[in-house]
Structures are given as structure tokens and as C-alpha cells.
Image (tube, rainbow, N blue to C red):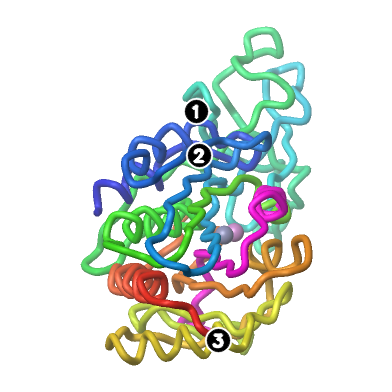
Amino acid sequence: MNELIKKLVEAYGPSGFEDQMRDLIRPEIELLVDELWVDAMGNLIGLKKGKGNGRKVMVAAHMDEIGVMVSHITEDGFLRFTNIGGVFPHTLLGGRVQFADGSLGIIYSDRLDNWSTIHPLEKHYIDVGASSREDCPVSVGDAAGFVRPLAINGSRLTAKSMDDRIGCVVEIEAMKRLQESPHDIYWVFSVQEEVGTRGAQAAAQAIDPEVAIAIDITPAADIPEAGPMAVVGIGKGTAIKVKDTGMIAHAGLVRLMKQRAAEAGIPYQLEVLNRGSTDARAMQIANAGSIAGCISIPTRYAHSQSETVDIADVEASINLLVEILSKPIEL
Ligand code: CO
Ligand code: ZN
């Protein structure tokens, strides 16, 4: 599984530019589904028909990652940029980015008079090694993602886009391990989550699921001065979402998730998050609504270039998803 994790977390794919990710995931799943298609927005959707009269279930993990987009090129070849999703200035100085064609850039900021402050995003720039606007290898409108190789430190894995490539891994592994299910399962690898769950919204409108489960990361709070906002820790189990700022998970589905985890001896935590939301929100309120929930992988340093998870939590998340989908969902 580490090989798959490495492949996905190091890949390029800011929101709206997920084609390289889609090309990596497609061969992993095409033999595991009955039908496979890509919708107009770029969501990759695989349908595996159930054996029995189960429910219509949609599972979604997002392929996109946060990143930057070139908004202006200076005369001497430096790039000014805007954010794609939640990119914070204090995570940027000295960071590296890559464009779709592999072009590399270094992020720095205009001179700081006071080193305990930080400039806003618009006073940062990317250096791609050009010396003039004319010899610049990229254009206005080109998007870049961050660059960091996967680091493995015991049970902990660190990468620039665990959010949500690790969710994609959980989904792929669950597809591989799920022997039989009574449910028609729509396995969705969604686009544009980081800019407002846009891909999952379109996919849910079309699929119209009865039950919807997102797989995403959630910020871990077992770090110094984390504040009371997040409650989960890494290495302590998968997280069953109860509430975030965009949704209240279906109480019956939360109950079922807890019960299945307890029965199978899967370690879990309950997540109440005061910042952010996931594809589950979009799926919950699409059309006439669905029974929606979310399995979260606790992650330290979310939306930095060193998002860190524990492999035991990844395993627990896969196991819980398989437990839920392999049996009837009666609420
Ligand atoms: Co995110
Ligand atoms: Zn995410």
C-alpha cells in the first residue's frame, strides 16, 4: 500500500487540474467495477452492482489538492499568484511548487521589515528560473501544486497532499478488499473539493444516492496549543464525523458506524470539527437529500506541505468502510 500512497501523494493535481490524478487512479480500479466513466466536470465514477437488494450508496474521496495559480508575470520573470483553496502565507516561504508540465518553482515573498510578521499572499512570488517575461516557461492561468516527497517515519507518513490522496487510497483499498456487498456502490473520485465541494455536488445530483459517505482528512489536535477546535489525535483510530461547519452527519449512520467499528474491534474517535467541511456536505443536500456521513483520517498540519497521518488510522478507516459496505445498511 505504501507504493500506492507514494504514487498518489506525490502526484500533481490542484483543483480543476485533476487529469494526471485520474490517469493514476483509473488503472487501479477499472477491473473492480462494472462500469467506469468520467463526467463533464472530471469526476471519475465507478459503479459496482450489489448482490441483493441493498441501497444505492455513493462513496467519495477528492483527487484535487490545494495549490496556486499564476495571475501576473513581472517584467523580470517572477510570477505573482492567487490561491487555489485554503493556502496560508505562513506555510509558503521557501516552499517548492510544480506545474502540470513538471516546471519547478520556488516561493518567496517581498522583503520583510520585521521577521516576526508575514506578508499576505499577494506579496509572495514564484521564481521559476526565468530572467524575463519572454523566457518564462509558464503562463498566466497555469496552476501549480506543492512538491514534497513522501516521508515515512515509523508508523507516520508525511506528504504535501494527504488531503485527500490518503482518502483516495482508503477508497481504492476498500474497493480491493470488499468481497461482496448487497449495495450498488458508486465509487467516486471527485474534483474541486478544495474550492467548495463542487465536483461531489455535481456527481451527487446525477447519482442521487440514498446513502453517501465521504472519505477525507480531519485536522488532529494532539499538538502544542492546538486550541479546543479539533478533538481527534493521530494513531488513535479512524474518526467518525458527527459535525463540522458544513454538516451534521445523519445520526443513524453515525450510530451504525460506531456499532460496526465496535463489533469488528476497529479503533475509532468521534469528530466534532469547528472549521471546514467535506464532500459529505454536498452529497447530503443534493436533490432531495441523502443519508450522509464521513469517515475521516486524523491529520496533523492540514493544508501545510507536511500533512502527517498514522498508517494505523488509514488501516482502521479502510476496515470501517469495508465493514459498513459489506452488510445491509438498516437505520
Ligand atoms: Co483540504
Ligand atoms: Zn480534503
For disc 1, the neighbor class at 10 Å (few under 14, some 14 to 19, many from 20) is some
Quadrant containing the C terminus in the rendered view? bottom right
Asked if the residue under mark 1 is in contact with the one under mark 2, i.e. CB atoms within 8 Å, the reply is: yes
Decide: few, some or many residues near mark 2? Use Cα within 10 Å; few <14, some 14-19, many ≥20: many
Q: Is residue 268 visible?
A: yes
**Camera-nearest label, 3 or 2:** 3
Q: Is residue 317 left or right of residue 139?
A: left
- Disc assigned to residue 96: 2
The magenta stretch is 198-225
Label 3 neighbour load within 10 Å: few <14, some 14-19, many 20+: few
Disc 3 target residue: 331
Q: At which x and y percent is residue 74? A: 76, 22
Q: Is residue 153 above or below residue 265?
A: above
**Circle 3 SS class:** loop
Q: Does the magenta stretch include residue 37?
A: no
Q: Earlier in the sequence, mark 2 or mark 1?
A: 2
